[in-house]
Amino acid sequence: MGLNLTLFMADWGQLSAIPVENRVQALADTTWSPELDDEYLRYGPAGGWLWPPNRGAAWCAEYNFFTTTGAYSPHARAGDAWADIRLLVDASVREAMDTFLVGLIWDADPADDPALTGGGGFFPPSTGRGLPHVLLVCPPEAVSGKARAWERVAPRLEKLREPFAAECEGWAGRPDTFEGFTALLREWGDVVREATRRGWGLVGLP
């Protein structure tokens, strides 16, 4: 079985008040309930934000992607596609897309990935003793920068079509189509805009 991505949007103040070693479990506990399981069974795996039953008091929500089945691999493939084409893209588009994608689905230098160390101490690093490897940690100040970058790049996605065709189309380990690639980017754009609107951060767990 492959790795999954469970993406949360969270109030950083509320999450910060929870002891570091309990934060991962708190996210899972807050967004899971029997009622949500019943809703999933009734309506199927529809995409979008999944809120706890007491939405008015909620401090986090889970996002289900419309364009994936919950697997992490589509995000990794999209990040690899960007790595393949970025040097073929106009510098102004490249700069904005780098800002948008870095730390979400792409890292210029994977060794600098903050998720590898628990987001600079915000989460405990994985020890193999029941603590999952955090896939991404994006605090509110970083999310707002990504939302600004997305606003610059979203109208110019078509400029990625030719580089994608040249470097990614038909290659294993890359998105199947340009349309699929950009649809996933647009979902990430929606995610960062909503998190920015609330002043919340993002956390990705396996």
Image: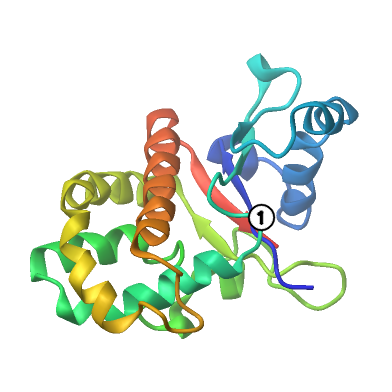
| Quadrant of the image occupied by residue 26 | top right
Instruction: Answer with left or right where residue 167 lies relative to residue 111.
Output: left
Say which residue label 1 marks. 70
Nearest the eye: 118 or 75: 75
Instruction: Answer with left or right where residue 195 lies relative to residue 22.
Output: left
Instruction: Answer with left or right where residue 58 lies relative to residue 127.
Output: left
What's the residue at 50%, 84% (across, down)? 172
The way the protein has been coloured in the rendering is rainbow
Residue 110: x %, y % from top left: 46, 82
Q: Secondary structure at mark 1?
A: loop
What's the residue at 23%, 51% (across, down)? 149
| Quadrant of the image occupied by residue 206 | bottom right
Amino acid at the residue labelled 1? Gly
Residue 159: x %, y % from top left: 15, 62
Residue 69: x %, y % from top left: 65, 54
Outermost front residue: 170
Outermost top residue: 56
Residue 189: x %, y % from top left: 37, 46
Q: Would residue 117 be seen by someone viewing this image from the given angle?
A: yes
What's the residue at 40%, 40% (across, down)? 190
Question: For the image shown, how many numbered marks are present on the structure?
Answer: 1
Nearest the eye: 169 or 203: 169
Relative to 64, is 94 above or below? below
What's the residue at 23%, 48% (across, down)? 154
Q: Would residue 106 be seen by someone viewing this image from the given angle?
A: no
Estimate how packed mark 1 is, as few (under 14), some (14 to 19) or many (20 or more) residues with alpha carbons within 10 Å.
many
The N terminus appears in which quarter of the rendering? Answer: bottom right
Outermost right residue: 34
Relative to 5, is 88 above or below? below
